[in-house]
Image (tube, helix red, strand yellow):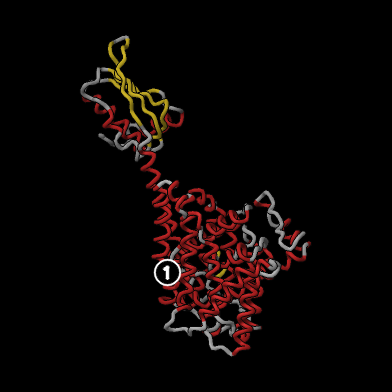
Amino acid sequence: MSADTVPPPAPSARTSTNPTVLTALRTPRVLLREVLAGLVVALALIPEAISFSIIAGVDPRVGLFSSFVMAVTIAFVGGRPAMISAATGAVALVIAPMMRDHGFDYFIATVLLAGVLQIVLGLLGVARLMRFIPRSVMVGFVNALAILIFLAQLPHLDPRSVPWLVYPMVGVGIAIIVLFPRLTKVVPAPLVAIVLLTVVTLVAGLSLPDVGDQGALPDSLPAFFLPQVPLTLDTLQIIGPTALAMAMVGLLESLMTAKLVDDITDSGSDKTRESWGQGVANIASGLLGGMGGCAMIGQTMINVKVSGARTRISTFQAGAFLLVLVVVLGDVVALMPMAALVAVMVMVSVATFDWHSVRPSTLRRMPLGETAVMVVTVAVVVATHNLAIGVGVGVLTAMVVFARRVAHFATVTRTLREGEDGPVAHYHVDGELFFASSNDLTTQFDYVADPARVVVDMRDSHIWDASTVAALDAVVTKYERHDKQVQIVGLNEASAARHGRLSGTLGGEG
């Protein structure tokens, strides 16, 4: 097997991990790539974990320990190989008020409850809801993520606070990441960039912002921590809403990331296992004094797309290396220039963005509604810096676009026929009937001019909701006011059952 060969994914999501891991273990070069990919991710995790700790209002050690625990735990219990879970900004934003208003013990209790809720939601099948997220929302999610990753680097490039030498160093780092893979892909290019720029900075004695400037690194291992909060209903009322929000945000971001990795690697994953696995990882993080988190999209892209990792080995190594780097080699890691990590993250943002989605040829072919959904998703995510909110708004927008589109597919055609007892007005209804398409159904009939007998033929339509049943009841009522008889025919089994169950019970006029 060549140096650039990646083991092919197994066909089944439930059996996709062990054969791949075994293949990596039997192939030294692939194993080396998995290990080095984990090292690159660990280096990229350090400043992010410190930043998210500051957002949450806790000591930087809390975020670093959380990232270590979650990465190692999810490597065993997660459902998506090679995905990285750690402390994240989305979770930090949700849980920060708990730390500010109630203190560290309630903070950790919230993390633990969120983990329990994720396990429950995972076992209840919340992952199946992913099928309701359209592709346009997924593209918007990816593009917004790329923009957020890039925007997060701007404070490290602010000319008011950094020396001019930062810019050529970032440029050199980007050049190394782009050009080095042409020589070999055995060693990840981001790792080469980080090492070379660190060596140059130290040897030349350059005064550049470094990792140590971001916050203090821990000098000891994490310890078991059990929050001292009363086990009462009052406590549940305090931590419950925040824990539920944290659980939902974490699951959404993790499942979206898992789907993205599935697409990149052309392989499947067990989303249910990933859901409850996130809960287990959060509980483990909380019991060791960590802030909890979820899948990290930027670091996952470094691992999968930039470094080419495909197995759980890289995820485990990311957590293991992180602990070694901050506890054992903290003094060395603190000297790494932030310019090197900025170069890596800038290239991650470029690699993450779906450039095909914004090509003029694509935009010309894409329906306007699909483009609008993508733009709305991107705009909301960038404005709120919250991927969960952006995806939620994107899905709602897609639902509105879809409802408006299919609302025009229902048509009503009127013909006059001669029956045994005289003329009959025959209405043929064609299309899917739900609240949007059936909204003006009552206006399609000529109640005054029609003869005494009316037939509504539903063989080419389907009743989906109570709004349609109410509309049909309204049609019948209007005709009865004119002493005319209405017969509804051709309902399929499901529509007939729904109509029979709801007709006359909805209180319409209609």
- Image label count: 1
View extreme (bottom): residue: 205
260 over 341 or under it: above or below: above
Identify the residue at the far right of this view: 26
Q: Which residue shows up at 45% across the image and 77% down it? A: 155
Q: Nearer the viewer, residue 189 or 75?
A: 189
Name which residue type carries label 1. Ile
Q: Secondary structure at mark 1?
A: helix
Q: Is residue 23 left or right of residue 132?
A: right
Residue drawn at the location 56% of the way across and 56% of the way down:
260
Query: Which residue sits at x=66%, y=52%?
Result: 14
The residue most toward the top is 420
Quadrant containing the C terminus in the rendered view: top left
Is residue 498 something that shows in the picture?
A: yes
Point out residue 61 in the picture as x, y percentages from the top left corner: 55, 80
Query: x, y percentage for residue 271?
Result: 58, 54
Q: Quadrant of residue 45 in the image?
A: bottom right
- The part of the image, by quadrant, that contains residue 378 is bottom left
Front-most of 1 and 425? 1
Q: Which residue is mark 1?
A: 238
Q: Residues within 10 Å of mark 1 (few under 14, many from 20)?
A: some
Image: 143 above or below 37:
above
Residue 451: image quadrant is top left
Q: Is residue 117 visible?
A: no
Where is residue 1? Give x, y as percent: 77, 59
Q: Is residue 490 above or below residue 409?
A: above
**Residue 477 image point, x, y percent:** 26, 28
Who's the residue at 37% across and 23% down the image? 457
